[in-house]
Image: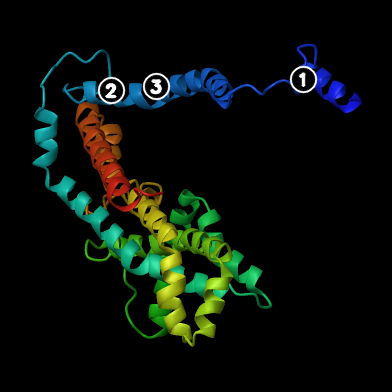
Amino acid sequence: MRGRIETASMASPESPSWLSARRPAGDGRLTVLVLFLPPALLLFTLFVVLPIGEAAWYSGFNWNGFGRPTNWIGFDNYRFVLESRAFWLALRNNGLIIVVSLLIQLPLALALALVLAERFRGVVALRMLFFLPYILAEIATGLIFSFVYDGDYGLVASVWRWFGAEAPHLLASTQTAMVAVVIVVVWKYFGFHMMLYIAALQGMDRSLIEAARIDGATRPQVLRYVVIPSLYPTIRLSVFFAIIGSLQLFDLVMPLTRGGPADSSNTLVTFLYNNGISRMRVGFGSAIGVILFLICVTFAFSYKRWFMRDE
């Protein structure tokens, strides 16, 4: 009887507040939204939406950046961009960087990750060695390789002379300038993708590999049917980063070639800078920026829809 009385008293209206029913989880989510969503939307509007709208507005003017834009020309800047040979050359260079990144940079990063994900003496030092180029600033990397490629006293010139050949001026030739830039891009960024793959490999369920080996699978079969399929989400993310980064490449190109010679190594962003900033063709440069923005947004949403819909 005494136990029943105590149970009834615990359930009475006078019971302490900490014993009462919890509040619905939705109240906490609403509080978080009210506190954090408006500042985030404000910052996004100030630093993303408004600059994009401003660039779209300026792209309708023939304007040099001084005073207020008054010479409205509508969509003529977009026509001038699309009729420019340098624009299509820059777009082709971006495509070349994407192809090299997908066919050389990412497979190289994956191969190294498969080796360096194992535990052996010195593996941490090797990981850091391959990751160091990514840590180095882009401007510093470009300046370093501008000396490496120098045809008079650079490292490449010294190697060629050692073999008795005439030293090439790689950055001064329209045939080799973009090749030299692409080599630097691969060297600079493959370590980032390698670390992504290593992180994914270390988080993989090892029991799947053990089960495959117990069933008699060879090492190549384990790699093909177990390891690589488990890395598909990371590979898709890595491909996304590689393509977006290739479209936005700027910092490496400027100290190396500044888009030259004769626009042969321009990317879309350096083409924008050389015209919109250096030559003060703000309306023309704004049109290039809008086109680049549309390319990136179209790719991002399409890639998310078709390749990352379940992630």
The colour scheme of the drawn protein is rainbow
Q: Which mark is residue 11?
A: 1
- Residue at point 34%, 60% (across, down): 181
Q: Position of residue 241 (x, y in %)?
A: 39, 52
Element at badge 2?
helix
- Residue at point 69%, 78% (across, down): 121
Tell me where residue 58 sits by quadrant.
top left
Give the mark nearest the N terminus, 2 or 3. 3
Residue tagged 3: 45
**CA distance for labels 2 and 3:** 10 Å
Q: Which mark is residue 53?
A: 2
Instruction: Say few, some or many: other residues with alpha carbon within 10 Å of mark 1 (under 14 / 14 to 19 / 20 or more).
Output: few
Residue at the right extreme? 2
Residue type at numbered disc 2? Gly
Residue type at numbered disc 3? Thr
**CA distance for labels 1 and 3:** 51 Å
Q: Is residue 42 left or right of residue 289?
A: right
